[in-house]
């Protein structure tokens, strides 16, 4: 590995490390700026139907137990020390380790985001190349009208519409959740079928929101590549259309890889809305519930995990692009 590329990898790693440190700081302060607090979620408000009444001594002990009585800078130092060890303490609402909650929810979000990423990338690339290759024709015009409309529809609205049409009216898919409760599976195939029947709608909803970005990028790159001499020469030599498209796709690899890495951040944001609409038990649903309950440890742990995953994937994409392109890190 030459020194310039090594320096490029190191400098980008340093930038992502600084970004992650800033995220840690923001992650600590944002939950504490919200009105209300964890104890209000536990006890309920005075106007609630069945408020939980705690005496001052019990409230004080709970505040001490969760370190909410400590000065803010002491809380921050403890938070940073715990984050370095991936120890986020106990959930204030559920009173179980935060790491256990996250590890129970993370696989569902990985399944949802991974399948949506594969689906949106595959069809975005395929439709983008076809649209760019047939630019100015009916297919290109139709896709250029449909894709921006898909991108402009809010995910929660699209999800609610899909639930109403395909689950409530037609009964093709379950209404919510990731598994059918209280079901006795006859085998592994039956369980997998049940998981994917619950996954289909939220995955399609998330993919529909992300696919237009990949489509537009690939189409624009394809149009630019079509004007390059190697494409004109290949066409003049009578090469098959399939082989020319393959070369165009290879030369579009770097922007596509960058687009996939950038999509991860949007997928995380979209997953919060979509998991909430579909009651899908992933990290997005966990963040939403923890926000309502002002569960600081769970919020902090969830945001750290999601931020770390997004930054790590972007860093990996930077390294991959430096090898694919051959020019990254040579400036």
Image: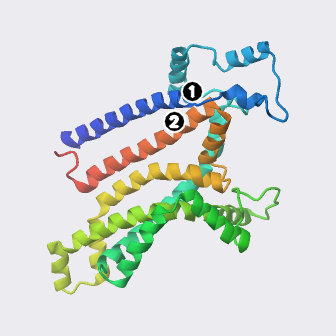
In the picture as drawn, the residue positioned furthest to the bottom comes out as 238
For the residues bearing labels 2 and 1, Cβ distance under 8 angstroms? no
Q: Image quadrant of residue 78? A: top right
**How far, Cα to Cα, is label 2 from label 1?**
16 Å
Residue 315 shows which numbered tag?
A: none
**Disc 2: which residue:** 304
* Lateral position of residue 120 relative to residue 236, left or right: right
- How packed mark 2 is, by other alpha carbons closer than 10 Å (few <14, some 14-19, many 20 or more), is many
- Is the residue marked by circle 1 packed among few (<14), some (14-19), or many (20+) residues within 10 Å? some
Tell which of 224 and 105 is nearer to you.
224
Quarter of the picture containing the C terminus is: top left
Q: Is residue 182 left or right of residue 244?
A: right
Hey, which quadrant is residue 169 in on the image?
Answer: bottom right
Earlier residue among tags 2 and 1? 1
Numbered label tally:
2
Q: Which SS class for mark 2?
A: helix
Tell me, yes or no, if residue 189 can be seen here. Answer: yes
| Residue linked to disc 1 | 32
Q: Position of residue 235 (x, y in %)?
A: 20, 83
The residue lying toward the viewer, choosing from 95 and 47, is 47
Is 203 in front, or is 257?
Answer: 203
Residue 285, compared with residue 238, is above or below; it is above
Q: Position of residue 9 (x, y in %)?
A: 29, 40
Residue 220, how many percent across, how many down?
29, 67
Look at the image and tell me whether residue 118 can be seen.
no
Q: Residue at x 74, y 15 (%)?
A: 61
Near-viewer residue (228 or 62): 62
Residue 157 drawn at (x, y percent)? 58, 60
Direction from residue 226 to residue 215 in the image, left or right: right
At x 50% / y 32%, what residue is drawn? 27
Label 1 SS = helix
Residue at the outermost right position: 50
């Amino acid at each position: 590995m030459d020194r310039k590329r090594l320096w490029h990898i190191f400098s980008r790693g340093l930038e992502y490390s600084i970004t992650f440190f800033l995220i840690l700081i923001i992650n600590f302060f944002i939950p504490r700026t919200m009105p209300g607090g964890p104890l209000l979620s536990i006890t309920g408000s005075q106007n609630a139907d069945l408020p939980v009444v705690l005496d001052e001594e019990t409230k004080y002990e709970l505040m001490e137990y969760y370190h909410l009585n400590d000065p803010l800078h002491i809380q921050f130092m403890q938070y940073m020390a715990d984050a370095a060890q991936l120890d986020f303490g106990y959930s204030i609402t559920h009173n179980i380790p935060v790491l256990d909650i996250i590890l129970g929810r993370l696989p569902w979000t990985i399944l949802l985001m991974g399948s949506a990423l594969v689906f949106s990338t595959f069809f975005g690339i395929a439709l983008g190349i076809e649209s760019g290759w047939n630019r100015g024709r009916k297919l290109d015009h139709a896709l250029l009208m449909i894709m921006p409309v898909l991108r402009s529809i809010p995910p929660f609205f699209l999800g609610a519409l899909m639930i109403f049409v395909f689950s409530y009216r037609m009964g093709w898919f379950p209404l919510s959740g990731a598994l059918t409760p209280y079901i006795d599976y006859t085998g592994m195939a039956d369980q997998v079928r049940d998981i994917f029947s619950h996954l289909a709608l939220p995955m399609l909803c998330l993919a529909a929101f992300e696919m237009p970005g990949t489509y537009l990028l690939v189409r624009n790159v394809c149009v630019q590549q079509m004007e390059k001499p190697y494409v004109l020469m290949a066409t003049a030599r009578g090469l098959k259309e399939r082989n020319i498209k393959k070369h165009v796709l290879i030369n579009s690899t770097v922007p596509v890889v960058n687009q996939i890495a950038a999509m991860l951040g949007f997928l995380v944001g979209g997953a919060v809305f979509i998991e909430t609409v579909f009651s899908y038990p992933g990290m997005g649903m966990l963040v939403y519930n923890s926000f309502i309950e002002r569960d600081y440890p769970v919020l902090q742990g969830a945001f750290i995990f999601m931020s770390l995953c997004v930054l790590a994937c972007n860093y990996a994409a930077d390294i991959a692009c430096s090898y694919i392109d051959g020019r990254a890190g040579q400036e």
